[in-house]
Image (tube, coloured by chain):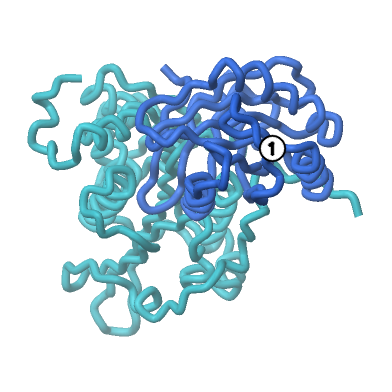
Amino acid sequence: MNVRLRLTRQLYDQVRRDLLRPHPFAAERVGFLFARLGNVGTAAPLVCFTAYRPLADERYIDDPHSGARIDSQAIRAAMQQVIDRGEGAFHMHMHAWPGKPHFSPMDRNELPRLIPSFQAVGPGCAHGLLLLSHDACAAEVWLPGSKRSVEAARISVVGFPMQLIPGGET
Amino acid sequence: MTNERFLRQSFLGESGQEVIGRCLVGLVGLGGGGGHIALQLAHVGFMNYVTYDADFAEDSNLNRLVIAIEADVAAGTPKVEAAKRRILGVRGAAHVETYRCRWQERPEPLRACDLVFGCVDSFAERRELEACCRRYLIPYIDIGMDLHQAGDEPPVMGGQVILSMPNGPCMFCLGYLTEEKLGREAARYGAAGGRPQVVWPNGVLASTAVGVAVDLLTDWSRSLRGPVYLAYRGNDGTVVPHPRLVHFRGGACPHYPPDQVGDPLFKRL
């Protein structure tokens, strides 16, 4: 399975600008990207992002053990977007340094718990987790009906200039 | 990959060459223009190709089809196979998928591409190809040439290279495609016969298109920041920004809204 993610340069820049904003107490910011699926049923599905929703400062919980912890209202709002838009939701955050980013043990333990909620309201959509660094990304994608994630091969930033950011592709 | 091979294009940067090698490029139409493009992409270092053409090499193609030779005509070699042979001749490790059919019959591999070149004959084909690329967020580079003759005047040779970027102006926005052109084309369907095609404008247009693609991927010039619509004037041998682009006022493309991406779905009302 060779899952590829695509978004426009405008959307990518919007995401980066938001995630790089300092928060009063959280060390990182979180947002949600929404996406439609393409090439469904093939070995090369496409996740095409359409919109980004940042989180308001008050949706963060002050937790010194976590870079960013968000409240249930933030998750409910993302679920509502899945219903309203008919699109999948991707949890976004960023490690603001160069090189291939890696989900932390806490990320790996806690973030996948969001996915069943998204799948419950958007069973025909792809949902996932996306972690950016300055020049690379790591993404896990849950295709419709799947309980297991697939590592995205790459994320393409479509604009001037193009960026083909390697993910799990070899 | 030998570093020496790309020594003379090292201005593209190490990461630029990597991106070129990583890019999955789609080529629709491997005739006069597409054949040139395939060959040049191989020289530049592209490694991954998805190619479409339903036709075979014919004698009437050899005035311009740089990927084919007389033996291909005798053997009835499909154009996609001729292109593959030429690409592999330059880049032996390249991965070339060949589809001897219209792209609409096997659209899935095309949708996976990072960049698509359209070298097709009709406005209707261009419209369909651009619509597919918009839906799957793929930059689309269109090339084409034409020859017009009016009365006793010498023929006027023209052509275009257009870069259509998702979220940017499309070929309708730029005035290259119009409902009137599509209607006229549909009305004369089957009656047009073979349109003039020669090797040198195809070469100019293909080289220009490859240059646009390399700049888009590597950002070597750091100046490509907007749509491309170049006009080729064969009679005076120039390629210039098209007046329609010069006077384009910008604004969001109304033909391909940003949320109309991915596979089409029925929506609940």
Residue sitting nearer the eye, A66 or B228: A66
Question: Residue at left 73%, top 45%?
Answer: B264
Looking at the picture, how far across and down is residue B9, in whole percent? 13, 38
Question: Residue at left 59%, top 53%?
Answer: B131
Q: Is disc 1 surrounded by few (<14), some (14 to 19) or many (20+) residues within 10 Å?
A: some
Q: Which image quadrant: the C terminus of chain B? A: bottom right
Q: Is residue B103 visible?
A: no
Q: Is residue B146 left or right of residue B187?
A: left
Q: Is residue A83 left or right of residue B120?
A: right
Farthest-out residue, right? B269
Total marks drawn?
A: 1
Looking at the picture, how far across and down is residue B23, in whole percent? 38, 33
Residue sitting nearer the eye, B134 or A17: A17
Name which residue type carries label 1: Ile
Residue beneath disc 1: A61
Question: Residue at left 46%, top 69%?
Answer: B176
Q: Which chain is represented by blue in the image?
A: A
Q: Is residue A137 left or right of residue B87?
A: right
Looking at the picture, how far across and down is residue B99, in whole percent? 50, 29
Residue sitting nearer the eye, A116 or B30: A116
**Chain name for mark 1:** A
Q: Is residue B129 visible?
A: yes
Question: Residue at left 25%, top 70%?
Answer: B240
Circle 1 sits in a helix, a strand or a loop, which is it?
strand
Identify whether B43 is placed above or below A112: below
Identify whether A83 is placed above or below A98: below
Looking at the picture, how far across and down is residue A156, in whole percent? 47, 39
Q: Which image quadrant: the N terminus of chain B? A: top left
Question: According to the rendering, which colour does chain B have?
Answer: cyan
